[in-house]
Image: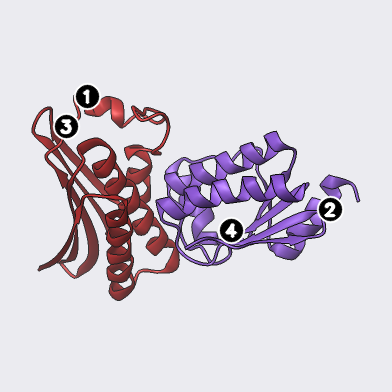
Chain colours: A red, B purple
Amino acid sequence: MEIQSCVTILNEWDIVAARQLGRNVAKELGFGTVDQARITTAISELARNIYLYAGQGQLCIDRLNEQGKTGLRIIAVDEGPGIPDIRKVMEDGFSTSGGLGAGLPGVRRLMDDFNIDSNPGEGTDIRATKWLR
Amino acid sequence: MRIPILKLKDCLLVSIQWELDDQTALQFQEDLLKKIHETNARGVVIDITSIDFIDSFIAKVLGDVINMSRLMGAKVVITGIQPAVAITLVELGIRLDDVMTALDLEKGLEKLQQELGD
């Protein structure tokens, strides 16, 4: 079962809207304050990546219910330049923007599941899930 | 909306009460440095008790304004970092090295007085 809500990311105000959406869904699903902060921060990082690197894209929040487990999945999709070397951006400390983002390794640590799909010239699709414990 | 900056003797007090967007954060950086210059403040306490998350952008703006204030001769203490904020900052991989912190505003002011030697 999935119920999805999305925010189109075009400017920095949309980053605020995306994290407000995520925080509300996290609260509604029953996540505690620490997980709410993790989810909100992860959304903020992913939405900012879209804004900085792709210019525009979509950030969606899925409410998951799989085999009795409740979860929140963040889906960040853009049709930007894509990531040529995924292994490199998953290394701590790698940045092409002069140290602005803590980057994807940080987001992976904040969430339980993390998956990235990217093709140069086609865009990037990142999915990250937090499960309710 | 601008973040109010209050003067108390030779210190400045800031309490960030709502979620920071990029513009507000950058405006605050500029406003604080101007206020330090105008008032000859020697110390600043920034209280973030009401902030429930900090992403890498806000962390960078805060870290930068602390370094900028130091260049101008003012010491900055950050107070009221919530447990959830401390956890996510560390997990995210953000280090705020060399940043003075204290549990709350009161302890922050005490720490600043010690640092300033009065």
Residue B76, visible in the rendered structure: no
Q: Nearer the viewer, mark 1 or mark 2?
A: 2
Q: Nearer the viewer, mark 3 or mark 1?
A: 3
**The residue under label 4 is which amino acid type?**
Ile
Residue A121: x percent and y percent? 10, 29
Q: Secondary structure at mark 1?
A: loop
Q: Quadrant of residue B70?
A: top right
Specify the label residue A51 is tagged with: none
Q: Secondary structure at mark 2?
A: helix
What residue is shown at x 78% (from left), y 46% (from top)? Answer: B42
Q: Which residue is mark 3?
A: A82
Q: Which residue is mark 4?
A: B81
User: Disc 4 is attached to a residue of which chain?
Assistant: B
**The residue under label 2 is which amino acid type?**
Gln
Circles 3 and 1 on the same subunit? yes
Residue A27, visible in the rendered structure: yes
Mark 2 crowdedness (10 Å alpha carbons): few <14, some 14-19, many ≥20: some
CA distance for labels 2 and 4: 20 Å
Mark 1 crowdedness (10 Å alpha carbons): few <14, some 14-19, many ≥20: few
Which quadrant of the figure contains the C terminus of chain A? bottom left
Residue B15: x percent and y percent? 61, 63
**The residue under label 3 is which amino acid type?**
Gly
Circles 2 and 4 on the same subunit? yes
User: Disc 3 is attached to a residue of which chain?
Assistant: A
Residue B92: x percent and y percent? 43, 44
Q: Which residue is mark 1?
A: A85
Q: Is residue A70 above or below residue A123?
A: below
What residue is shown at x 27% (from left), y 49% (from top)? Answer: A47
Residue B104: x percent and y percent? 69, 63
Contact flag, marks 4 and 1 (Cβ < 8 Å): no
User: Disc 1 is attached to a residue of which chain?
Assistant: A
Contact flag, marks 1 and 2 (Cβ < 8 Å): no
